[in-house]
Image: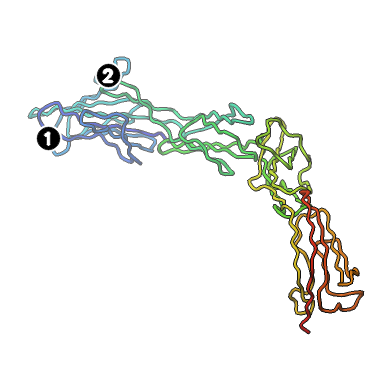
Amino acid sequence: MLPRFFFLILCCIPASMLSLSGQISASGNVSVAPTGYEDSDGIHDNIFIFSQHQGEITATLQGVAGSFDFQWSRYDHLIPGFGEIFQADQGSVSRVAAPRSGGYQVRVTGAGGIDTLLRAWVFVNTKEPSPSFRVARYDCQVLDLAGTAGIDTFFYYNPYDHERNALQPVIRWTADPSLQMPSRRLDPRIWSPPPVATEYTLTVDYYSGQASYSMTLDPLTTKAEFEIEPAEGEAPLEVTFNSGKSLNALEYQWTFDYRTNDPEVPVPDDLTSDPTYTYYIPGEYQISLRTINGLCEDLYIGTVPVSVYPSELEVANVFSPDGDGYNDVYMVHGVSLREFHAVIFNRNGMKVYEWTDPKEGWDGLKGGKTASPGVYFYTITGVGWDDKEYKFSGPLSLYRNR
């Protein structure tokens, strides 16, 4: 058998010039809370919460000795107000055993003009909270949950204007994985539902009783996100795209040069999950990934563009192939070059060395033999992937320290 809970609201209302203090109490109360209304002095009545099979209301006057008359009545919202006397006692205290739900008022009178009123509200709770909820709406944009607290709500009435008030439960929503949830509402709305399976839990605290209800929902939405490697370099630049951070995706649509100001939806460049793409033309490229799962989709535009360096070609006019590890090979500084050609001549116009890869160079050998120190001549040309042309020629000094 479930315990019954008693919620008691007390107030002392002097009806004479005497300054009296009275109270309605009960043994075994577990907590106390204020009512939602207050008297003309701004004082709230108290709500005493009990957790026991049966309760007992006790009315006493404090600091006054003697025997008194106690007259009890119950609140009737149809009047509205307190009705006929249902119990009358004499003595120093008066008790009402196992009161049923409702409002109670006791008038205490006695010798010397004592005449005062005490009030109490009683709630007999017959069950623990039994919360539950259902899915009211679930689509790509919104998840609406509709919950019920599963409680016997207790209503009490403001004795001054007879407005009805309810003892409200404490509502808490949680999600796993963690998700910011609206609180204190039985009908929360979640914008952009998560793209992973999520367990939602509704917990209801109703004074000394607490219960929870959980439901796991499979995802409808998807989340697009990716990583790129490398993010910059010279042309031709091969970039690998990794969609491993995307969630709940069935389809992938990559755009390797996404233009945010283009009003037309771009045709995807690739439909695989982890593509590789090579950039040839120098510049910066915005990347986008659209993931699709049924009717839901998500677009992620990369925060860091792919940067392909513009072409460069710089040449030197001296080197020292003496094996000291410094400037031993005559090389150029070339970036993003589509074409390259370099030739070294001696002073007689004879070709000494030739190469077509800007990452290579002349190590100072001539036909497998060490070239003599002195002045040589170079002719170097190149064309960048951005179509910029380069042409250099001039003397080259070869030094040897040993």
Say what amino acid the circle numbered 1 marks.
Gly
Instruction: Decide: is 366 above or below 163.
Output: below
Query: Circle 1 is placed at which residue position?
Result: 66
Q: Judging from the image, what secondary structure is the residue with disc 2 in?
A: strand
Q: Is residue 83 left or right of residue 366?
A: left
Given residues 164 and 391, the one toward you in this image is: 391
Quarter of the image with the C terminus is bottom right
Q: Judging from the image, what secondary structure is the residue with disc 1 in?
A: loop
Place of residue 162 in the rendered image (x, y in percent of width and height, measured from the top left): 30, 20
Place of residue 143 in the rendered image (x, y in percent of width and height, measured from the top left): 59, 31
Given residues 207 and 382, the one toward you in this image is: 382
Question: In the rendered image, is residue 79 in sight?
Answer: yes
Place of residue 80 in the rendered image (x, y in percent of width and height, measured from the top left): 29, 17
Query: Circle 2 is placed at which residue position?
Result: 81
Which residue is painted at 48% across and 37% down in the image? 172
Q: How many marks?
A: 2
Name the residue furthest top: 79
Rendered image quadrant of residue 125? top left
Which residue is painted at 81% across and 77% down in the image? 374
Q: Is residue 178 left or right of residue 293?
A: left
Instruction: Decide: is 375 above or below 62.
Output: below
Which residue is painted at 45% across and 34% down in the image? 184
